Amino acid sequence: MGKPVRFLDPFVPFGNALEDSDSVAATIFRLANRLGGRLTLSDIVIETGMDPKQAEKFIESMIDGIRVRMEVDEKGIVYYEFPEILARHQDRV
């Protein structure tokens, strides 16, 4: 498990929020790679140490339909998928 990442609210003037956001995004991409390209909000909270509401807001800001997309399965579980990473892992199988 990686080191928890400190997340700063971008609306609070402290440090460089952009650098912190980039660091969190990189952590989430590494986690997605480690878990095969599919994450839940709980995965993100556990890895980053972020508050669940902050984590949800952050991952939803990353959704672009190309690199990150949100899918809901038949049980209602929300997954955040990283198609490029999913494809890479499927090629290995």
Image (spheres, rainbow, N blue to C red):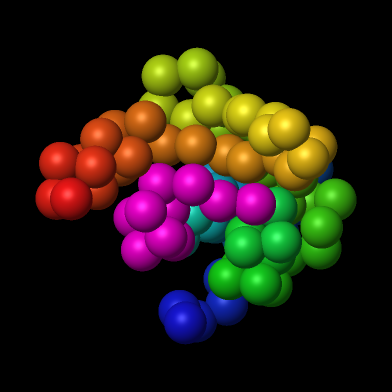
Image x and y of residue 17, in percent: 61, 50
Image x and y of residue 81, in percent: 49, 37
Whether residue 84 sits left or right of residue 70 in the image: it is left
Is residue 27 placed above or below 82 in the rendered structure? below
Residue 7 visible (yes or no)? no
In the image, 23 versus 92, the foreground residue is: 92
Q: Residue at x 37, y 53 (%)?
A: 36
**Quarter assignment of residue 73:** top right
Image x and y of residue 88, in percent: 20, 42
Question: Quick one: which residue is furthest to the left in this view?
Answer: 92
Residue 78 visible (yes or no)? yes
User: What residue span does the magenta drawing correspond to?
Assistant: 31-40
Whether residue 32 sits left or right of residue 78 in the image: it is left
Q: Residue at x 79, y 51 (%)?
A: 54
Image x and y of residue 20, in percent: 54, 56
**Quarter assignment of residue 30:** bottom left
Q: Residue at x 48, y 30 (%)?
A: 68
Is residue 21 placed above or below 50 in the rendered structure? above
Magenta stretch encompasses residue 22: no
Q: Residue at x 63, y 41 (%)?
A: 79
Whether residue 63 sits left or right of residue 12 in the image: it is left
